[in-house]
Each structure stands twice: as structure tokens, then as C-alpha cells.
Image (cartoon, grey):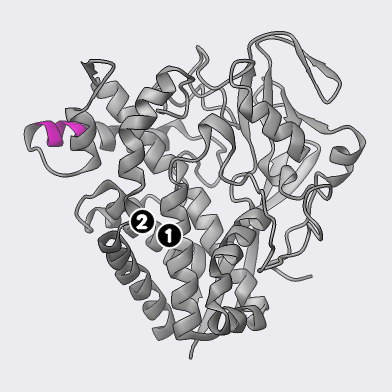
């Protein structure tokens, strides 16, 4: 079977019941699988809450035991959510600026050129992680050299090879952010840290804890997801050279191709919510204070919405995917991620004739009754110059 083929493990449950179930650290999760139901739950923030009392509980797997800092604005509901979002949205739209794109292009072209200079490259660690970390320096507006430390942490912020959630590893990130906040207080600069430290919402300055919450989200939310999107796209074009050639000949389909790859691979499987009142989803009773998850990956393969849902259709005309979430809490870093993909695919089409997968080790996510391939633990690829 093709290495870039990602099966849909949710299909039977989605069609039969509309939901699945998993036990997450003895805190059960009802997984909502249909596109319509997922969007309905995501839109209804009053019943399905992000900003509950327990920090980290809406993440699946739950991060209750490895952090006590609320990720902002991710774990805050309206009306306060809007205050935070209005403050930081302009910063996260900077990837639309020409100067930002020029610098991002330089970063991505260097990673691709380095790959072309080698006999073969391990894409996860040596390509995608480097690209993601170096691009993050632009988003934070800090010196490029900082990326070398982040690269040394490996691909996962909260997980080690043998532990799903590793508090010791998470504390490396938290301690680092604390130090950077203190450094910026002592020596103000033009970084995201400084913007947040100087900002006011609702007539007051942000606390250090709130600043930390925004920065943790920026680091953690865009790490595995960007690495998966980049790695999985490399695998796809390695096995579909005519698709890469098509991008070269038809650059006008680039934007639809990006949305389609993001839909198909769905770099983040699901996101949870805490139920605030007894209710029903998919004609199934759900108790207050229990958890649901909105399974983006399943919704993005819903055959009632997407024709040929299990195929990559680069020029898909109608594509209401939910890979970046939906509703109030749609992904803050979506603009940055889309620009990374746009520049990467443009660079590959201009500089790379073909790619060949030499060896691949899949990353399989265990979700009790479901097993989902989310990407690769390693992917050895040969890049051939155009």
C-alpha cells in the first residue's frame, strides 16, 4: 500500500452511530464523528465549553496532569475570548505581509536546497522539524538562532518516545518561556513577548501567566501539526510525481491543493470540549461535566460532504474542511501554516524533479476502538534536483 495513503478508521462508526468512545486517562471522551455534528458542537461554545475550570482537560489526551497554565485564547470562551483574540489576531496575520513571506521563503528554500544536496534526508527530524522551528522565529519575531534550541527538543513538546505525556519534558518548554518573559521585561524588544507584556485588555495589563499562556499555545499548537502537514505532503508528492508536475504547470490550483492536503491528512485528529449541561449529540444522551471531542479527521472524510472523500483531489472545488477547527476557536496559527505550505509547495515545484521514499515508519495514534495514522515517526526520502 502507498505510504502516503491514510485510511479512514472512523467510517463505520460515523455511518452507524455518528460517534465513537475512548477512555482518556480514566476520563472518558465521546468522539463526535460526522461533519455536520462536529461543526454544530464547535459552534455551540455555551454547551460545549473550552474554558472550563480544569486547565488542559479539553485536550485529547488530557493535559491536566502536565500543566496548570491556561492556553490563551484557546481555553477561554466568549465574551473574554474576543478580547484576547482582538489583541493577538493582527500579529498572527503578519504572514500575509510581503516582508514576512520573503523571509519565510528564504528559510524554506534553504531547507529544500540542503535536502537536495544530500543523498537522502530523514524528513521528520532533518526537514520538517527544522522548517517548523525556523519559521516559528518569524512568527515570534525573535532571532533565527533560537530555533537551534527548539530543534534539539525533538518533534514533540509534551511527549517522549515511551511516554504519551511527559511532564518533565513539558517543563523544559515552560521554564524556557518563563525565562524569555523575564528577559523581555528586562530588555524590551519587538517580539511577541513584548507585544503581550505591553498590551492591555479590558482596561488592564496582561499578567505574566496570561502572556505565558499565549506563548505556550503558539509553541505547542503549531509544532506537531505543521511537522505532520509538511512530512505527509512530502510523502504524497514522492508517490505522486505527476501531482508535483501538475503544480508546476498549473500554479493556479496551488491554494485549492493546500486546502485539500490539509483536509486529507488532518494533522490534528480531534479537540475536546467539556459539556456544561445534560444534552444530546447524535441522539445520544451526554451528561454535564463529561467530555466530547470534535473529531476533525473523521469530519473531513465524511462522504456526505466530500465526494471521493478518501482520495486527494488537488483541484477540489468545494472543500469545507475543519482541519483548522470551526467557529469561535478556529486555529490562531492557520495563516502562518497556510503560508508555510504555499511556499513549500511552490519551492518543491520549482526546484525538485522528483522524490523517492526509501524507508518509512508510520506514527499510529491509538484511540481505543480506533487506530489512526497521523503521520510518520521517520521518513527517509531522496530529493532529486529539477
Secondary structure at badge 1 equals helix
- Tag on residue 372? none
Q: Is residue 93 visible?
A: yes
Give the magenta range: 179-185
Residue pointed to by mark 2: 96
Could you tell me if the residues under marks 1 and 2 are in contact, i.e. CB atoms within 8 Å?
Answer: yes
Q: Nearer the viewer, residue 238 or 329?
A: 329
From the viewer's perspective, is the residue at label 1 or at label 2 nearer? 2
From this viewpoint, which residue is outermost toward the left? 187
Q: Nearer the viewer, residue 273 or 183?
A: 273
Mark before the other along the chain sequence, 1 or 2: 2
Residue 184 colored in magenta in the image: yes
Q: Position of residue 63 (x, y in %)?
A: 52, 27
From this viewpoint, which residue is outermost toward the right? 16
* Image point (44%, 40%), residue name: 332
Q: Position of residue 112 (x, y in %)?
A: 41, 76
* Image point (79%, 47%), residue name: 302
Name the main secondary structure of what is drawn in magenta: helix
* Image point (58%, 39%), residue name: 325
Q: Position of residue 199 (x, y in %)?
A: 21, 27
Q: Is residue 215 visible?
A: no
- Residue 13 in the figure: left or right of residue 60: right
Q: Does residue 229 lie above or below 17 as drawn? A: below
Q: Does residue 282 lie above or below 378 as drawn? A: above
User: Pointer 2: residues within 10 angstroms few (<14), some, or many (20+)?
Assistant: few
* Image point (55%, 56%), residue name: 228
Q: Which image quadrant for residue 319?
A: bottom right
> Which quarter shows the N terminus?
bottom right
Q: Nearer the viewer, residue 177 or 80?
A: 80
Q: CA distance from mark 1 to mark 2?
A: 8 Å
Residue pointed to by mark 1: 339
Amino acid at each position: 500500500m502507498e505510504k502516503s495513503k491514510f485510511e479512514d478508521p472512523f467510517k463505520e462508526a460515523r455511518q452507524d452511530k455518528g460517534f465513537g468512545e475512548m477512555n482518556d486517562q480514566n476520563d472518558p471522551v465521546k468522539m463526535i464523528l460526522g461533519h455536520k455534528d462536529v461543526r454544530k458542537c464547535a459552534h455551540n461554545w455555551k454547551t460545549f465549553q473550552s474554558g472550563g475550570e480544569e486547565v488542559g482537560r479539553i485536550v485529547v489526551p488530557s493535559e491536566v496532569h502536565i500543566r496548570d497554565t491556561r492556553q490563551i485564547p484557546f481555553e477561554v470562551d466568549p465574551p473574554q475570548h474576543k478580547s484576547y483574540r482582538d489583541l493577538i489576531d493582527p500579529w498572527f496575520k503578519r504572514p500575509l505581509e510581503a516582508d514576512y513571506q520573503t523571509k519565510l521563503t528564504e528559510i524554506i528554500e534553504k531547507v529544500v536546497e540542503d535536502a537536495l544536496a544530500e543523498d537522502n534526508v530523514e524528513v521528520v527530524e532533518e526537514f520538517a522539524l527544522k522548517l517548523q522551528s525556523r519559521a516559528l522565529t518569524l512568527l515570534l519575531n525573535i532571532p533565527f538562532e533560537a530555533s537551534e534550541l527548539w530543534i534539539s527538543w525533538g518533534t514533540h513538546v509534551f511527549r517522549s518516545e515511551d511516554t504519551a505525556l511527559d511532564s518533565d519534558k513539558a517543563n523544559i518548554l515552560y521554564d524556557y518561556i518563563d525565562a524569555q518573559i523575564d528577559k523581555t521585561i528586562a530588555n524590551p524588544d519587538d517580539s511577541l513577548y513584548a507585544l503581550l507584556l505591553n498590551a492591555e485588555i479590558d482596561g488592564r495589563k496582561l499578567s505574566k501567566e496570561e502572556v505565558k499562556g499565549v506563548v505556550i499555545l503558539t509553541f505547542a499548537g503549531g509544532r506537531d501539526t505543521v511537522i505532520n502537514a509538511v512530512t505527509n505532503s512530502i510523502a504524497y508528492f514522492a508517490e505522486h510525481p505527476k501531482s508535483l508536475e501538475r503544480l508546476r504547470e498549473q500554479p493556479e490550483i496551488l491554494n485549492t491543493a493546500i486546502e485539500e492536503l490539509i483536509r486529507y491528512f488532518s494533522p490534528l485528529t480531534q479537540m475536546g470540549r467539556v459539556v456544561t449541561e445534560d444534552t444530546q449529540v447524535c441522539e445520544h444522551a451526554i451528561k454535564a461535566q463529561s467530555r466530547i471531542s470534535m473529531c476533525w479527521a473523521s469530519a473531513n472524510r465524511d462522504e456526505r460532504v466530500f465526494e471521493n472523500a478518501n482520495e486527494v483531489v488537488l483541484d477540489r472545488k468545494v472543500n469545507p474542511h475543519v482541519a483548522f477547527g470551526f467557529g469561535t476557536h478556529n486555529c490562531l496559527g492557520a495563516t502562518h501554516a497556510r503560508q508555510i505550505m504555499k511556499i513549500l509547495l511552490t519551492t518543491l515545484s520549482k526546484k525538485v524533479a522528483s522524490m523517492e521514499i526509501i524507508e518509512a515508519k508510520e506514527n499510529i495514534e491509538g484511540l481505543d476502538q480506533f487506530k489512526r495514522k497521523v503521520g510518520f515517526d521517520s521518513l527517509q526520502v531522496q530529493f532529486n534536483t529539477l
